[in-house]
Amino acid sequence: MEHVEYVYTSGMTESDVDARLRTGEHGVLGLADGDDAYAVPLSYHYDGDRFLLRVSAHGDDGEKGRFVETTDTATFVCYESSTEESWSVPARGPIRKYERDVDEATLNEWFQPFRLFDEAVEAVEFTLYELRPETVIGRATADR
């Protein structure tokens, strides 16, 4: 593979990881049920200690919720990538339903606008889940 192009990456500092996660808006949540895997892109809010994940329950018959119930350790990956620069932060930890009530103004502050796909606004319902990462590793394009 001597003619394949490579880009070097290096570990990110804790402060760089924190800054990327606080300014990011979306990532991919990986869940499991035995040998079945499920991954879904989600909007998130990160406060330095935990991710709050906004999950829509419309149109999937609760599949996301069922996978959350069977997952002991979830993985949430935040990333950006271009030809010039990239970074990724996989965070692993337990996931559970967020039990506090959150008003609409706070939801609008925490999350980017929800993208509708042929759903009526009235039909869309959200559940918030909390992921408290036990491990977080960040990597970014290295300057060479």
Image (cartoon, rainbow, N blue to C red):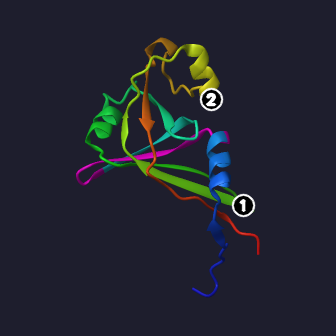
Q: In which quadrant will I find the N terminus?
A: bottom right
* Direction left: furthest residue: 34
Q: In which quadrant will I find the C terminus?
A: bottom right
Report x, y in % for residue 140: 65, 62
Mark number, residue 85: 1
Please name the amino acid that badge 2 sits on. Gln
Q: Residue at x 69, y 58 (%)?
A: 82
Return the disc, 2 or 1, that comes first in the chain's sequence.
Answer: 1
Report x, y in % for residue 42: 51, 37
Q: Residues within 10 Å of mark 1 (few under 14, many from 20)?
A: few
Vertical position of residue 117 compared to residue 6: above or below:
above
* Direction bottom: furthest residue: 2
Magenta-colored stretch includes residue 33: yes
Please name the amino acid that badge 1 sits on. Glu
Q: Residue at x 71, y 62 (%)?
A: 83
SS type, badge 2: loop
SS type, badge 1: loop
Task: Between residue 112 and residue 96, name the one nearer to us.
Answer: 96
Q: Residue at x 51, y 38 (%)?
A: 51
Vertical position of residue 56 compared to residue 13: above or below:
above
Count of number-bearing discs: 2
Magenta-colored stretch includes residue 123: no
Vertical position of residue 132 compared to residue 65: above or below:
below
Mark number, residue 135: none
Query: Which residues make up the magenta segment?
Result: 23-36
Report x, y in % for residue 24: 64, 42
C-alpha separation, residue under disc 2 versus residue under disc 1: 23 Å
Q: Position of 98 compared to 110: left or right?
A: left
- Name the residue that disc number 2 marks: 112
Report x, y in % for residue 7: 67, 72
